[in-house]
Image: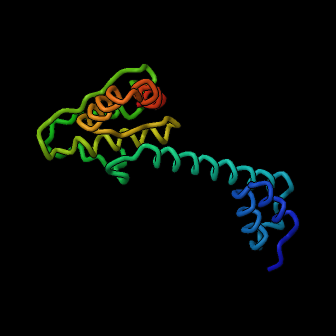
């Protein structure tokens, strides 16, 4: 298929979501029945979705989660670990982050504390917040080293840029 000038222009403007939608609409039979406004609406919706997806993926990469696949929808509330379902669902709203509150997840080994933390982090990334996953011993070690070699102000500033 030859490139349509509009498709080429969309790619040149880095409107990749619109370009993909344009290409798909060109190949569909029923797209000729759409009005100009409907075509434009579909292109804009695809571009907006594409950009939000890229921002989410970038936040997830930056977070460096130990369990990238930990999703809030997959939390098993039936497992015997003492997880308070209403409390956890309230935490998933992210209000505690916006209120600049801290959260400490405690419990015995093997109950899924890290996985739950990663699920909370993914929920925050979905809500447009930046997250950085660090285990406490490693964080304290990095802070101690930074104090020793003079990087503490810069490291502290970098850490406080993140929502949680």
Image quarter of residue 105: top left
Residue placed furthest toward the front = 149
Residue at 82% in and 60% down:
34
Residue at 88% in and 66% down:
5
Quadrant holding the C terminus: top left
70 lies left or right of 107 = right
| Residue in front for this viewpoint, 91 or 9 | 9
User: Above or below — where is 81 with respect to 57?
Assistant: above
| Residue in front for this viewpoint, 4 or 164 | 164
User: Above or below — where is 85 with respect to 96?
Assistant: below
* Residue 8 coordinates in the image, percent (x, y): 82, 65
* Residue 3 coordinates in the image, percent (x, y): 83, 73
Residue placed furthest toward the bottom = 1
| Residue in front for this viewpoint, 76 or 23 | 23
| Residue in front for this viewpoint, 129 or 81 | 129
Quadrant holding the N terminus: bottom right
Residue at 74% in and 50% down:
44
Image quarter of residue 103: top left
* Coloring scheme used: rainbow
* Residue 93 coordinates in the image, percent (x, y): 42, 32
Residue at 17% in and 46% down:
79
User: Above or below — where is 160 with respect to 33?
Assistant: above
65 lies left or right of 61 = left
Residue placed furthest toward the left = 108
């Amino acid at each position: 298929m030859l490139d349509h000038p509009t498709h080429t222009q969309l790619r040149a403007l880095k409107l990749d979501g619109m370009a993909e939608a344009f290409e798909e609409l060109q190949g569909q039979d029923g797209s000729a029945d759409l009005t100009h406004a409907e075509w434009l609406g579909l292109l804009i919706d695809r571009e907006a979705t594409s950009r939000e997806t890229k921002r989410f993926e970038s936040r997830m990469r930056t977070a460096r989660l130990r369990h990238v696949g930990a999703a809030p929808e997959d939390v098993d509330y039936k497992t015997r670990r003492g997880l308070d379902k209403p409390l956890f669902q309230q935490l998933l709203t992210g209000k505690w982050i916006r209120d600049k509150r801290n959260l400490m997840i405690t419990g015995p080994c093997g109950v899924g504390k890290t996985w739950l933390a990663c699920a909370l982090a993914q929920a925050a990334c979905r809500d447009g917040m930046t997250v950085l996953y660090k285990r406490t011993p490693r964080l304290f070690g990095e802070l101690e080293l930074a104090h020793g070699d003079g990087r503490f102000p810069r490291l502290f500033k970098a850490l406080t840029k993140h929502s949680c």
